[in-house]
Amino acid sequence: MKRGNPLASRLPVRLVRELGLAEGDRTDLIRNNGVLRVRCAPRTREVLDSLQQFRSRFPANERPWPR
């Protein structure tokens, strides 16, 4: 099934639940030595949350971005 440039794929419900996927999540299918793996891309919120750890590392007067 074609949706824009990427090719959409259907996964069994059991696998979707096991991986904790939701509609709109991005995944990659990776083939390695005849084995197909599903890799889940991090969600936007997860990336932003992980970046929070760096938020206070720069003193206010040395931050490379404007306030």
Image (cartoon, grey):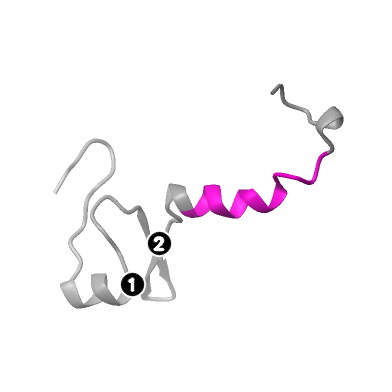
Asked if residue 57 lies in the magenta stretch, the reply is yes
Residue 4 percent across, percent down from the top left: 23, 36
Q: Amino acid at mark 1?
A: Leu
The amino acid beneath tag 2 is: Cys
* x and y, in percent, of residue 50 in the image: 59, 55
Tell me the element at label 2: strand
Vertical placement of 30 versus 13: above or below?
A: above
Q: What label does residue 46 carry, if any?
A: none
- Taken as a whole, is the magenta stretch helix, strand or loop? helix
Instruction: Categorize mark 2 by other alpha carbons within 10 Å: few (<14), some (14-19), many (20+).
Output: some
Q: Are marks 2 and 1 in contact (CB under 8 Å)?
A: yes
Check disc 1 and report the residue beneath it.
19
Q: Residue at x 17, y 43 (%)?
A: 2
Is residue 22 rendered magenta in the image?
no
Which quadrant, please, contains the C terminus?
top right
Q: Which residue is outermost to the left? A: 1
Above or below residue 57? Residue 11 is below
Question: On the image, numbered disc 2 is attached to which residue?
Answer: 40
36 on left or right of 16: right
Residue 11 is situated, as x and y percent measured from the top left of the image, at 20, 67
The residue under the point 44% across, 76% down is 33
Residue with the most extreme top position: 66
Q: Secondary structure at mark 1?
A: helix
Q: Is residue 59 left or right of residue 36?
A: right
Residue drawn where x is 70% and y is 44% of the image: 55
Image quarter of residue 5: top left
The part of the chain drawn in magenta is 46-58
| Mark pair 2, 1: CA separation | 8 Å
